[in-house]
């Protein structure tokens, strides 16, 4: 999304309606949200990459464990074969006890060689079993992290779906009257057309629109961990009324902050909320038709989950 930086001139023109301190706080909040959105996108990409890497590691560990297991089985067979040969030699040794000393010495050397081979195989088998145990432990640890990540992501998705259902239920009386609720990319988008909220060129919220925002606030108050971004949008018709508003940028910001004021008055934590204005630059429909312009004149309330737990798990 494009960031909005109000110029010094605009700030002066807005001073009659919004104090410098309030405007600075709004700008700072939006900057923090922009950084937060970037962080969330980066975290999401990092999460997907980590999941892929973990999956590849697990596959490699499984293959290596299978190879190691096969080697252990083979060495066990070789050890059993050597033990049988050793027993046979012991029996042969008894039979050869009456033979010449040279023959006996040769058998003794062969016997000693076989004993050394048996000992070497046993040592190798022990090493491979230790290695197999370590590989299994590594595989179990990676699998546990994958399971924890998937469980945490699933819980976040379930919580967002539950939140969407609660919002849809709260706003059911307004759907079809310029209000929609959607779940996209792990976020909830509550879109309100201006016909529900504002008169043309104005930023004071009408009674119907205020009722809708209040119903939404009741849900948000119960979900203090959700980040709330209020975005103002306009069509591409130039703003002509003058006064403290210079253009569509200003108008979109004023409309966004008008929604913020209602949420604050309904005890939604200001720490959750950020206001932003995009003017005419992120349309959802063509500005060539009246219907398209009506869709572009809107307020979008974007609700996103807190991913601090996911980040912590990834960094462990």
Image (cartoon, grey):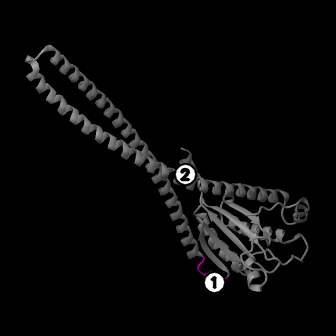
Which residue is disc 1 drawn over?
A: 176
3D distance between C-alphas at marks 1 and 2:
41 Å
Region of the chain picked out in magenta, as a range = 171-177
Nearer to me, 66 or 174: 66
Residue 9 x %, y %? 92, 62
Q: Residue at x 81, y 56 (%)?
A: 24
Asked which secondary structure carries label 2, the reply is helix
Q: Mark 2 points at which residue?
A: 50
Query: Visible in this render: residue 11?
Result: yes
Residue 97 placement (x, y as % from top left): 9, 18
Q: Residue at x 50, y 56 (%)?
A: 152
Q: Identify the mark nearer the N-term, 1 or 2.
A: 2
The secondary structure type at the circle numbered 1 is loop
Is 172 included in the stretch rendered in magenta?
yes
Please tell me which residue lies in front, 132 or 48: 132
Q: From this view, report whether residue 93 is shown above or below residue 216.
A: above
In this picture, is 152 found above or below 134? below
Drawn side of residue 292 relative to residue 308, left or right: right
């Amino acid at each position: 999304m494009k960031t909005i930086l109000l110029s010094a001139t605009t700030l002066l023109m807005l001073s009659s309606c919004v104090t410098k301190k309030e405007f600075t706080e709004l700008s700072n909040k939006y900057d923090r949200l922009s950084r937060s959105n970037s962080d969330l996108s980066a975290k999401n990409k990092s999460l997907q990459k980590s999941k892929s890497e973990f999956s590849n590691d697990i596959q490699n560990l499984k293959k290596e464990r299978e190879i190691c297991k096969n080697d252990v089985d083979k060495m066990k067979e070789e050890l059993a074969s050597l033990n049988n040969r050793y027993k046979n030699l012991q029996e042969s040794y008894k039979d050869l006890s009456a033979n010449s000393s040279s023959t006996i010495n040769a058998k003794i050397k062969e016997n000693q060689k076989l004993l050394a081979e048996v000992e070497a195989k046993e040592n190798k088998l022990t090493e491979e079993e230790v290695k197999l145990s370590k590989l299994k432990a590594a595989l179990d640890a990676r699998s546990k992290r994958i399971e924890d990540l998937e469980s945490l992501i699933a819980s976040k998705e379930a919580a967002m779906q539950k939140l969407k259902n609660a919002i849809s239920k709260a706003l059911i009386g307004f759907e079809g009257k310029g209000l929609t609720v959607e779940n996209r990319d792990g976020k909830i988008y509550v879109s309100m057309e201006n016909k529900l909220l504002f008169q043309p060129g104005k930023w004071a919220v009408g009674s119907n629109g205020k009722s809708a925002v209040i119903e939404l606030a009741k849900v948000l108050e119960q979900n203090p961990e959700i980040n709330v971004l209020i975005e103002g949008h306009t069509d591409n018709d130039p703003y002509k009324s003058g006064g403290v508003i210079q253009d569509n940028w200003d108008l979109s910001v004023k409309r966004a902050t008008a929604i913020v004021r209602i949420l604050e008055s309904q005890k939604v934590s200001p720490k959750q909320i950020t206001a932003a204005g995009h003017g005419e630059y992120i349309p959802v429909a063509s500005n060539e038709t009246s219907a398209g312009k009506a869709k572009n004149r809107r307020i979008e309330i974007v609700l996103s989950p807190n991913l601090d737990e996911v980040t912590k798990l990834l960094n462990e």
